[in-house]
Image (cartoon, rainbow, N blue to C red):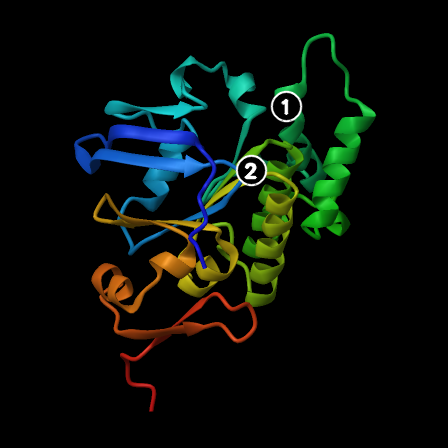
Amino acid sequence: MSASIPSPGRLRAESVTLRYDQRVVSTGLSVDVPGDEFTVIIGPNACGKSTLLRSLSRLLRPAAGEVTLDGRSLASFKPKEFARTVGLLPQSSIAPEGITVVDLVSRGRFPYQKLVRQWTDADEAAVRDAMTATNVAELATREVAELSGGQRQRVWAAMAIAQQTPILLLDEPTTYLDLTHQIEMLDLFARLHRAGTTIVAVLHDLNQAARYATHLIVLKAGEVIATGAPSEVLTEHLVREVFELNCVVMPDPVSGTPLIVPTDGEWR
């Protein structure tokens, strides 16, 4: 079977240095995020996955180099203009005190609001559909602060989906979710991808990454180690090199995607 060729990159980090104050995370990092793909960024803890995603979302400005969207520097976009193209589900968020679920999800429509534009039926439908898709419609009148961590995560996902952007960035979207809700959420993002949304997600679970991604970016210590389709990238050698884990990689009996089975550990 011939290797699939990703479509041209929409988001690009070109020789960027990423740091927090004096702590440098990446130096000279270059990444091409292809359009129309479900890209998952994987790597060990503290390797720079979330930092890279923050730079792609304009939350972190590179100390050197440049991040571009369709060849245009992110710094040149006005906030609402960028927010109509790129949506973000951050790793952790704090909701305003006293805000209800429906009010928070409705904030996803902020990029489309203007002084002369009132709330429309299209806005209402976007909020309703996002809440239904994430199974939070029954929580509409509850205050976000009253919810469990998993419920809050689904509400934030609903807000990002209500934004209806062609590119959606997800920083550990399954945080706080039990296994059933993890699969439901990833299935939802897979459906959005099939409908035309470019998805870029940070995931920790290698088997979930292998099953849902169409394109992987593997990081270690702030450097790109490999990119490509999961079937091409996820080898026993790579898992051992990047994650320091001995394993067997075999076809998943359900999806046919790579399945990583650890051979290390005391399970007996």
Which one is in front, 178 or 207? 207
Badge 1 crowding class, 10 Å Cα cut-off, few under 14, some 14 to 19, many 20 or more, is some
Q: In screen coordinates, is 30 left or right of 143? A: left
User: In the structure shown, which secondary structural element does the residue marked by tag 2 occupy?
Assistant: loop
Q: Does the image show residue 160?
A: yes
Badge 2 crowding class, 10 Å Cα cut-off, few under 14, some 14 to 19, many 20 or more, is some
Query: How many callouts does the rendering have?
Result: 2
Amino acid under disc 1: Phe
| Residue picked out by circle 1 | 110
The disc, 2 or 1, on the residue closer to the chain's N-terminal end is 2
Cβ–Cβ below 8 Å for labels 2 and 1? Answer: no
Q: In screen coordinates, is 222 left or right of 8? A: left
162 above or below 121? below
Q: Residue at position x 34%, y 57% from top?
A: 233
| Residue picked out by circle 2 | 95
Q: Residue at position x 17%, y 31% from top?
A: 22
Q: Give coordinates of residue 243: x percent, y percent.
A: 26, 62
Q: Quadrant of the N terminus?
A: bottom left
Question: Which disc, if any, is residue 89?
Answer: none
250 above or below 149? below
Amino acid under disc 2: Ala
Q: Give coordinates of residue 242: x percent, y percent.
A: 24, 59
User: In the structure shown, which secondary structural element does the residue marked by tag 1 occupy?
Assistant: helix
Q: Give coordinates of residue 103: x percent, y percent.
A: 69, 34
Q: Disc 2 versus disc 1: distance between alpha carbons?
A: 15 Å
In the picture, residue 254 is in which quadrant? bottom right
Q: Give coordinates of residue 71: x percent, y percent.
A: 41, 20
Residue furthest to the front: 1
Q: Residue at position x 67%, y 50% from top?
A: 134
